[in-house]
Image: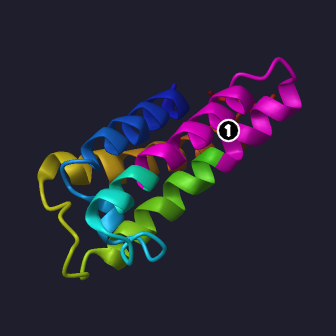
Amino acid sequence: MSFYLGLALLFTHEMDSMPNHEWRVLPLLRSLSESAGETVFIIAHIPLFALSIAYLASLNTRTRKLARDIACGFFIVHAILHAFFAGHPAYEFSSLLSSLLIYGAAACSVAYFAASLLLVDGDPA
């Protein structure tokens, strides 16, 4: 359950990233014009979400478990990157809601990995 909650928090964070103009902080996008950066940011999420969902829902147990492990690792790295970019002048994620979405996904990942270590089959999803 912690994996699915973390995934929901990350997906909701991506909705929250629009009013917070996340593309203004990202190294590859911040050099683009405002409208181009926003467009590339949005379009880039289509293949990212499609591939993520496909692998996370794979019928192959090993593929699904590996995808969940990679996703949870990303949730933690993502939170670290947000902490790192928090000092950037264009960083706008200052609300409690934004913090709960970003760091909540990372906390769910820690719970997922902890449960993986405790379970025999290693898949606490």
Which residue occupies the extreme top position in the image? Answer: 59
Location of residue 73 by image quarter? bottom right
In percent of width and height, residue 22 lies at 31, 60
Q: Nearer the viewer, residue 60 or 20?
A: 20
Q: Which residue is label 1 attached to?
A: 68
Task: Indicate whether 56 appears above or below 89.
Answer: above
Q: Main secondary structure of the magenta part?
A: helix
Query: x, y percentage for residue 21?
Result: 24, 58
Choose top left, top right, bottom left or bottom right for residue 122.
top right
User: 33 or 62: nearer the eye?
Assistant: 33
Residue at 37% x, 62% y is 37
Quick one: quadrant of the C terminus? top right
Residue 117, relative to residue 58: is it above or below?
A: below
Boundaries of the magenta span: 41-70
- Depicted 123 relative to depicted 22: above or below: above
Q: Is residue 72 magenta?
A: no
Residue in the foreground of this view, choosing between 68 and 17: 17
Describe residue 71's horizontal placement relative to residue 16 as left or right.
Answer: right
Q: Few, some or many C-alpha atoms within 10 Å of disc 1 (few <14, some 14-19, many ≥20)?
A: many
- Residue 25 is left or right of residue 66, and the answer is left
Q: Residue furthest left?
A: 95
**Type of residue at label 1?**
Arg
Q: Nearer the viewer, residue 8 or 37?
A: 37
Please provide percent x and percent y for residue 26. Answer: 41, 70
Q: Who's the residue at 53% across and 49% down the image?
A: 44
Report the residue at 87% width, 23% height from top: 60
Task: Report the side of 91 relative to 125 (left or right).
Answer: left
Query: Tag 1's secondary structure?
Result: helix
Is residue 61 rendered magenta in the image?
yes
**Residue 84, percent from left and from top:** 37, 78
As drawn, is 20 to the left or to the right of 58? left
